[in-house]
Amino acid sequence: MSIKIDPISRHVDLSKAGMAEFQEKLRLQHETSMHKELEKLLATAKGAEQEISKKDFEGFKNLFHRFLQVKGPSVKWDKIHKPPEDLIHPYDKIKAQVLPDSVAASLNKLVVVKLNGGLGTSMGCKGPKSVISVRNENTFLDLTVHQIEHLNKTFNVDVPLVLMNSFNTDEDTKKILQKYTHHRVHIHTFNQSRYPRINKESLLPVAKDLGVHGDHGDAWYPPGHGDIYASFYNSGLLDQLIAAGKEYIFVSNIDNLGATVDLFILNHLMTQPKDKRCEFIMEVTDKTRADVKGGTLIQYDDKLRLLEIAQVPKAHVDEFKSVTKFKIFNTNNLWISLAAIKRLHEQNAMDMEIIVNPKTLDGGLNVIQLETAVGAAIKAFDNALGVNVPRSRFLPVKTSSDLLLVMSNLYSLDAGSLTMSKKREFPSTPHVKLGSSFTKVHDFLMRFESIPDMLELDHLTVSGDVTFGKNVSLKGTVIIIANHGDRIDIPAGAVLENKIVSGNLRILDH
């Protein structure tokens, strides 16, 4: 094969026949170089750290190999079909079933897994996001422990809690867990893998050694929640739970306050016919215009499959965002068979689509990180189902706007679970958009003397330097905008109903 390289443009001139061979050689070259660099990194470690890193690197090599093989979109648009109705079960029908006396036996076969790898940096907090106070001084982790303890006491069962930590959250989380020693919940942890960030140009690791602290921290990343299957298996905890008679895990993000153990879904899962034993349930909910980027369930090659926006060809992105064609989205509340995870991992049969996440490090270096999503494995499991759940099971707290909602009187707290107040006349949550002055939790809390009454609120937009006095009530549509250099103090006891409050504190009817 003759390859001509123009010394000025450095373009490779190949015949079509030679292009495939050239690309294959290039892939092999990148893979060989990557493996050499990983061996160098491993040589800097000893003992247990080396063993853990070796397992992590095996997973990374597999992902990197698949990344180099990818050619174009992972789906063909004309092969995408709406899921058959018998594979998306409506929650109302499931809830209409009477719970049997054996529900306690079903609970004893369940494990709750919370994805706890994220930091609170986007909300201006240090340490794990799960330790941010979200309601009555309770953190995400407190609420989770209270929920499971309540289940264990009510039904006299043993539902354990498992936290999937990352190298960013593990140390701090383990210190905090000591305070739950006397609670009626067995808590286990395992760490998701640690993968090296890749230089976008050279396709080699940025890391020079295995250190994760100080200047070395940004050379590594936790590779998305799709890593749960491999890291759970590698930790030994999967086998330990199977040996203890556990059959299913209920997995969710720790910041989704709507993701509580639902006895009706659990019963539905456990009572499927033996020849159609369901190995995977994905909770989906109806899409609104706020959820247009959320992954959706489709039928593809006669299997249920998760379609993420990153997989959609550019020409079809608007169609993907359509609320009329793709009506549901993935809440990331998942019920998965432990035995099936073990079988599929040992067969290397998960085949989750790779998400390429570009980042720019502080020094300006462009890197990529290869990730996978836990829900993407649905296509590998037998008799997988979707359950269309109420919106109340999707209550994520990603921003201070979300935090305002869950701290308000819109919700009541009972045994660690938040439920919409019965005093609210309609079930939808208001649309809240707080400006950049509220981004950090500390600043957010300083701007409210008390959380306003929001029972009759539909829409709230706040921008600029705004503070709220005690016992403020917000109703209908309220827009408060302080222009640059202005400050607006909403006085104590104020009732704003369908008002626009501008920089000079004029209050206008909306």
Image (cartoon, rainbow, N blue to C red):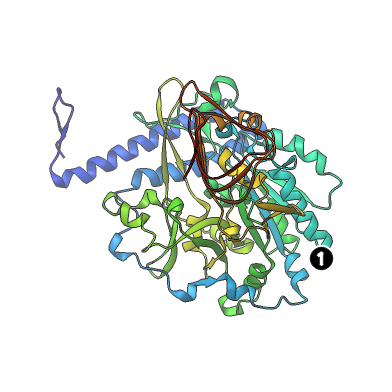
In the image, residue 267 sits, relative to residue 149, either above or below, namely below
The answer to whether residue 349 shows anywhere in this view is no
Quadrant in which residue 79 is drawn? bottom left
**Left or right for 287, reference 318:** right
Q: Position of residue 510 (x, y in %)?
A: 46, 45
Residue 81 higher or lower than 137, as above or below: below
| Spot occupied by residue 390 in the image (x, y as percentages of width and height) | 57, 63
- Does residue 166 appear in this view? yes
Q: Which amino acid does label 1 sit on?
A: Phe
Residue occupying the point 46% across, 59% down = 287
Q: Mark 1 points at which residue?
A: 155
Q: Which residue lies furthest to the right in this view?
A: 182
Q: Quadrant of the N terminus?
A: top left
x, y percent for residue 72: 29, 49
**Residue at disc 1, secondary structure:** helix
Q: In this rendering, is residue 253 above or below 130?
A: below
Q: Position of residue 341 (x, y in %)?
A: 58, 59
Q: Which residue is drawn at 56% across and 77% down?
A: 276
In the image shown, does 490 or 295 lie closer to the viewer? 490
Residue 165 appears left or right of 384: right
